[in-house]
Amino acid sequence: MTTATDCPCGSAKAYAACCEPVVSGKSPAATAEALMRARYTCYTKSNIDFIERTHAPESKADFDRKASEKWAKEAKWQGLEILAVKNGAASDDTGVVSFVARFETGGRSHEHREIATFRKEKGAWTFVDGKSPKPDTFVKSGPDVGRNDPCHCGAGKKFKKCHGKDA
């Protein structure tokens, strides 16, 4: 159960002890994951200034403030799940955070999956880029169906006469 003082990022800490010091500028994000959590929290609070401010210089041109504001305000944020973190510790200069942000719009649930890249700029973590994860490759594990084998659909015909390219 969450309370009004819980941090929206899902850390199970109070907002004042989690993302609030980063968002307010009292302390910098110690890790790439901490910045990721603060950015998610800012979407839930419609604090687009923080989102814009934490972009790396080369990614600011691609930032659509109006679209971000619209998304932040219209979405009912349901949670953040960190799937994986590669580097991004306080001693690193780069890091990657894979995450799922769950939200609802128009009465429908959605998931935003992203692999986000972060870099330190003058000692502060910045968001560089976000990419959608590639879908899992499907690998067929069963044997190939031969032309004269029974069709997989159960019609009782040979595959070549039912679903084969001769059908």
Image: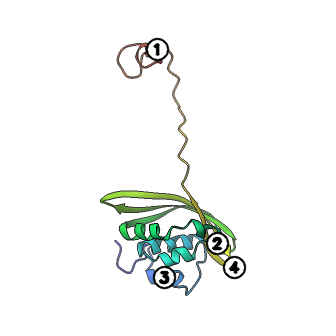
Residue 90 point in image, percent of width and height: 65, 75
Count neighbours of disc 4 (C-alpha within 10 A) and say few if under 14, some if 14 to 19, many if 20 or more. few
Which residue matches tag 1? 166
Amino acid on which the number 3 mark rests in the picture = Glu
Quick check: can you spot residue 11?
Answer: no
What is the three-letter code of the residue carrying label 2?
A: Pro
Q: Earlier in the sequence, mark 2 or mark 3?
A: 3
For the N terminus, the quadrant is bottom left
Q: Seen from this angle, which residue lies furthest bottom?
A: 26
Q: Secondary structure at mark 1?
A: loop
The disc, 2 or 1, on the residue closer to the chain's N-terminal end is 2
Which of pointers 1 and 4 lies earlier in the amino acid sequence?
Answer: 4
Q: Nearer the viewer, mark 3 or mark 1?
A: 1
User: Please, what is the three-letter code of the amino acid marked with disc 1?
Assistant: Asp
What residue is pinned by disc 3? 20
Marks 2, 3: nearer the viewer = 2
Give the spatial CA distance, label 4 vs label 2: 12 Å
